[in-house]
């Protein structure tokens, strides 16, 4: 796809438009708070939210908790994605596996991920293992679904080609089918990471002693709306960065696809 | 054919009609008084225990007070999420009275802009217990160093526990605290995820069943380390219906009178047993302790001093970021009026800020078995 | 799809082909779950774990029966379903309107698009504490959360679908001198219908997730999430398993019905 070179002025204008609404809202928020028209328990002043953010950054709480949350997400995601790749490939490649394993998987996948947490807490307690397990499961499902579908969607013509070239099974899978399914695999990975992120927050809200979700939960219990808002913003920012990183990786790895015949 | 109504009869009917309309206009729109209680009973039963509000609720004191007013409805909500959840409902405008809100959530709420008046005490000097697994080898508070504890953040249980732990050298630095509610704490304790949790009488029957061990309680030090609950009303409701507020306070004072009287000890425990917890637990909790020691509504120097002190601690622990105005919070006028009307001004003893008694109370002469 | 299967088996060099008849496939699909259930039941009979830690499939089924006859179960399911529905209807309609706005108006897209994308970065459950502080933890808070969860999927898909309408159709509308209303009703909506329905289906899934989440995190009230909480508090795993099984079945029914409605709608518009 060719990059259209929009003139700098047009891009700047777009940027300004994009920032306009948030800027207006922020000004409105600050104005209402300054005029004392905003009850604290509905929306604290932007300055208070900023102060809460700075406080937690200064005390080190922000960094240590963010790091812990990130660790959990990546641990869980790695486990879930790996397992998902394996099961997804099995389901996509082997009709036998599909018949026997798919119904059970789909039945389990229908349950909202969160619903498993109470049971998991009874089984594994409230430590890291519970959180990593549920995050892994949340990543697992979309990876399986997308890899499965991606492999199934590989056009018959490609498979025909593999047969005509007398590739053996292993070769045809690794050189033809899997590469053709890479876009779907990446979609699955991206969804899996998004799920992992969402589940991490939910699991930390449930029972935790550290993490961004814990800070939000504690802010809620202590009725510190400014802390809650500050942490929600941090979550958004970190989420953006993580998604952006994955997007970049995907772009890099998929570049070769554009040059494929 | 036309019916000739005598003029006098017509006049009487009109007068009656006008009178009825006038009477109706006095309590024109129906009012629902919404009470919130920060806790639930065993198995999430919608009952309370251990305080004046529990007696009032189980004994229908509020409903009796308004039984003659068809336009006034009473609504009770019990919050599994304890004080923090109640605060949320208060903030959203869904409650009129916070009946029995704990000290920490009340202070935190006020610090963050919840506009309420402190009407009367609900329970003071409440004991908390430390529960650990029977096989854990923890026999004293100091043994908790390096272990994992659960805390229900934002509740008066947390504040009391924090102060006890601090007094014995424990803090975030040498023990790990996990935010869990009551049900979650017990499950986590059982499964070994945590090593200890603080709680109240619900732990006593668990100890009797061998599920937990209780190596420590604040019973001996309840004057310093106990927790408190109070009855608050929203400023909005107080402004709109001061007469209703007075009647509610009257009813709560009646319940307090009943609950503090030693002669009613058994009846009070039976009320509390509606939560599903056994009477024996309440008996043990109040062993060698008079009901009136905890069930006292008076706003004396002790109570004000406690809340002032707790507010300072809460600020110190960083749980609130600004100072709280405690002085203007108390509105004892309703309580004083109720006590006067029921001749109870000298019923409860009063204490000064250091906990020393400055006035005797008639309740101290009540005895079990006396009628 | 079938050609891939044949090609696949041909590459493997196998002579037989797997059963195609739906009934046979369905039955075979039950083999593994059935086997696991049997193993589970045997493990319980052999007392490999105490009853309260691992209830047997039979005791779970029994629990289901008692709950059903107990009376509150129907209430719980009904409460959860009503939350899903209420939240879905309010959230998706708002999302649809917003998506249409962003898709149809370049200015709106430039003004609100970035903010919306930024909003989407924030994990859904991070909003639970805020919503419960604003709306309380009762029904209002729960429905608010479910609505919120339904907003974004519908909005995003609608937005994308409208933007994906081929330029040719827009030109056609200009040629036929369609006014804006005509354009929306005769060209935009039908053209974007497939994408909109994808968004609605995604919203429905999120509605379930949010409903269970709201019931777990907010005040106790009748609901399937409430049953999970109850089971956890009372350490009654059989109750939790009943609730989870029901959730799975309901989720499946919802997904299937949504797919069915989608197929019918698209067929009607001859877009399938």
Image (spheres, coloured by chain):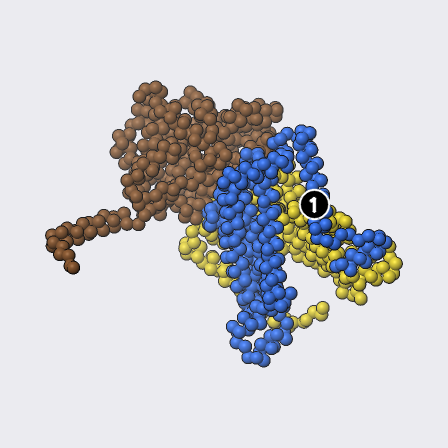
Q: Who's the residue at 57% across and 79% down the image?
A: C176
Lateral position of residue C237 relative to residue B123, left or right: right
Q: Is residue C241 visible?
A: yes
Element type where label 1 sits in the image: loop
Determine which quarter of the picture holds residue C152: bottom right
- Quarter of the image with the C terminus of chain B is top left
Return the residue found at the far front.
B1
Coordinates of residue B102 in the picture (x, y in percent): 44, 36
Count of number-bearing discs: 1
Coordinates of residue A9 in the picture (x, y in percent): 61, 72
B2, above or below B346, in the image: below
Q: What residue sits right under mark 1 in the picture?
A: C30
Determine which quarter of the picture holds residue B297: top left
B146, above or below C83, in the image: above
- Pick whichever, B285 or B229, lies toward us: B285
Coordinates of residue C136 in the picture (x, y in percent): 46, 47
Q: Is residue C129 visible?
A: no
Q: Who's the residue at 32% across and 24% down the image?
A: B363
Lateral position of residue A84 relative to residue B330, left or right: right
- Pick whichever, B88 or A124, lies toward us: A124
Q: Colour of chain C?
A: blue
- Pick whichever, C212 or C59, lies toward us: C59
C139, above or below B46, in the image: below
Q: Who's the residue at 66% across and 57% down the image?
A: A244
Return the residue found at the far right.
A166
Packing grade of label 1 (10 A; few <14, some 14-19, many >=20) is some
- Pick whichever, C209 or B38, lies toward us: C209
Q: Colour of chain B?
A: brown
Q: Who's the residue at 75% across and 56% down the image?
A: A151
Q: Chain of mark 1?
A: C
Q: Colour of chain A?
A: yellow
Coordinates of residue A30 in the picture (x, y in percent): 47, 57
């Amino acid at each position: 796809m060719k990059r259209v070179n929009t003139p700098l002025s047009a891009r700047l204008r777009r940027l300004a438009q994009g920032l306009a609404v948030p800027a207006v809202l922020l000004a409105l928020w600050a104005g209402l708070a300054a005029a004392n028209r905003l009850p604290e328990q509905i929306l604290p002043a932007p300055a208070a939210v900023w102060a809460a953010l700075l406080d937690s950054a200064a005390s080190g709480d922000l960094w240590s908790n963010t790091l812990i949350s990130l660790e959990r997400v990546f641990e869980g995601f790695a486990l879930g994605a790996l397992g998902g790749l394996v099961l997804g490939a099995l389901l996509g490649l082997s009709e036998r596996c599909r018949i026997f394993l798919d119904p059970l998987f789909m039945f389990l996948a229908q349950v909202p991920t969160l619903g498993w947490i109470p049971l998991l807490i009874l089984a594994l307690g409230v430590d890291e293992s519970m959180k990593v397990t549920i995050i892994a499961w949340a990543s697992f499902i979309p990876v399986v679904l997308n890899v499965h579908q991606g492999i199934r969607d590989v056009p018959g013509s490609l498979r025909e080609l593999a047969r005509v070239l007398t590739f053996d099974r292993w070769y045809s899978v690794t050189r033809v089918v899997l590469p053709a399914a890479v876009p779907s695999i990446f979609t699955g990975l991206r969804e899996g990471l998004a799920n992992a992120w969402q589940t991490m927050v939910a699991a930390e809200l449930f029972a935790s002693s550290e993490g961004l979700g814990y800070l939000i939960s504690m802010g809620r219990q202590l009725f510190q709306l400014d802390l809650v808002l500050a942490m929600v913003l941090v979550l958004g920012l970190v989420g953006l960065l993580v998604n952006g990183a994955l997007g970049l990786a995907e772009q890099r790895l998929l570049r070769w696809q554009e040059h494929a015949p | 054919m036309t019916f000739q109504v005598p003029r006098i009869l017509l006049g009487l009917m009109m007068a009656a009609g006008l009178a009825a309309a006038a009477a109706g206009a006095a309590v024109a729109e129906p009012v629902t008084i919404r009470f919130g209680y920060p806790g639930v009973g065993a198995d999430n039963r919608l009952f309370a225990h251990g305080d004046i509000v529990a007696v009032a609720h189980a004994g229908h004191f509020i409903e009796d007070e308004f039984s003659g007013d068809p336009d006034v409805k009473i609504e009770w909500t019990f919050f599994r999420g304890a004080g923090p959840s109640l605060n949320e409902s208060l903030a959203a405008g869904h409650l009129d009275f916070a009946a029995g809100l704990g000290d920490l959530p009340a202070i935190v709420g006020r610090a963050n802009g919840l506009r309420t008046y402190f009407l009367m005490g609900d329970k003071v000097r409440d004991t908390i217990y430390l529960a650990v697994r029977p096989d854990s080898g923890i026999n004293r508070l100091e043994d908790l160093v390096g272990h994992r504890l659960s805390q229900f953040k934002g509740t008066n249980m947390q504040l009391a526990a924090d102060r006890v732990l601090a007094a014995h050298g424990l803090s975030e630095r040498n023990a790990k605290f996990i935010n869990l509610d009551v049900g979650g704490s017990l499950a986590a304790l059982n499964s070994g995820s945590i090593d200890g949790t603080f709680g109240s009488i619900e732990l006593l029957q668990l100890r009797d069943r061998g599920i937990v061990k209780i190596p420590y309680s604040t019973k001996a030090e309840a004057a310093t380390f106990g927790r408190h609950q109070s009855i608050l009303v929203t400023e909005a409701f107080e402004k709109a219906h001061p007469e209703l507020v007075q009647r509610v306070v009257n009813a709560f004072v009646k319940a307090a009178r009943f609950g503090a009287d030693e002669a009613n000890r058994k009846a009070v425990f039976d009320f509390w047993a509606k939560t599903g917890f056994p009477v024996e637990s309440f008996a043990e909790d109040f062993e060698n302790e008079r009901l009136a020691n905890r069930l006292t509504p008076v706003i004396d120097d002790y109570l004000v001093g406690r809340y002032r002190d707790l507010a300072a601690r809460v600020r110190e622990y960083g749980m609130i970021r600004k100072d709280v105005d405690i002085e203007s919070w108390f509105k004892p006028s309703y309580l004083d009026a109720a006590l006067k009307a029921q001749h109870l001004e000298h019923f409860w003893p009063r204490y000064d800020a250091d906990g020393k008694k400055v006035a005797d109370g008639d309740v101290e002469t009540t005895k079990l078995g006396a009628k | 799809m079938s050609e891939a299967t044949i090609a696949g088996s041909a590459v493997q060099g196998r002579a037989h082909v797997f059963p195609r008849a739906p009934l046979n496939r369905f039955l075979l699909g039950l083999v593994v779950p059935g086997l696991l259930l049997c193993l589970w039941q045997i493990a319980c009979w052999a007392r490999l774990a105490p009853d309260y830690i691992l209830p047997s499939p039979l005791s779970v089924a029994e629990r289901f029966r008692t709950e059903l006859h107990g009376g509150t179960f129907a209430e719980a399911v009904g409460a959860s379903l009503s939350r899903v529905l209420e939240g879905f209807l309010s959230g998706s309609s708002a999302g649809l309107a917003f998506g249409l706005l962003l898709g149809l108006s370049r200015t709106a897209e430039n003004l609100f698009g970035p903010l919306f994308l930024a909003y989407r970065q924030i994990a859904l459950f991070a909003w639970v504490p805020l919503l419960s502080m604003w709306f309380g933890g009762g029904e209002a808070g729960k429905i608010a959360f479910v609505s919120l969860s339904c907003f974004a999927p519908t909005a995003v898909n609608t937005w994308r679908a409208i933007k994906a309408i081929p330029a040719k159709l827009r030109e056609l509308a200009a040629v036929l001198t369609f006014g804006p209303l005509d354009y929306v009703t005769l060209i935009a909506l039908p053209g974007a219908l497939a994408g909109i329905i994808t968004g609605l289906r995604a919203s429905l899934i999120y509605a379930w997730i949010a409903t269970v989440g709201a019931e777990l995190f907010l005040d106790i009230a009748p609901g399937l999430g409430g049953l999970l909480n109850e089971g956890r508090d009372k350490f009654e795993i059989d109750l939790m398993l009943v609730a989870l099984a029901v959730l799975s079945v309901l989720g499946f029914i919802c997904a299937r019905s949504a797919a069915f409605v989608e197929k019918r709608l698209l067929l009607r518009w001859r877009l399938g």
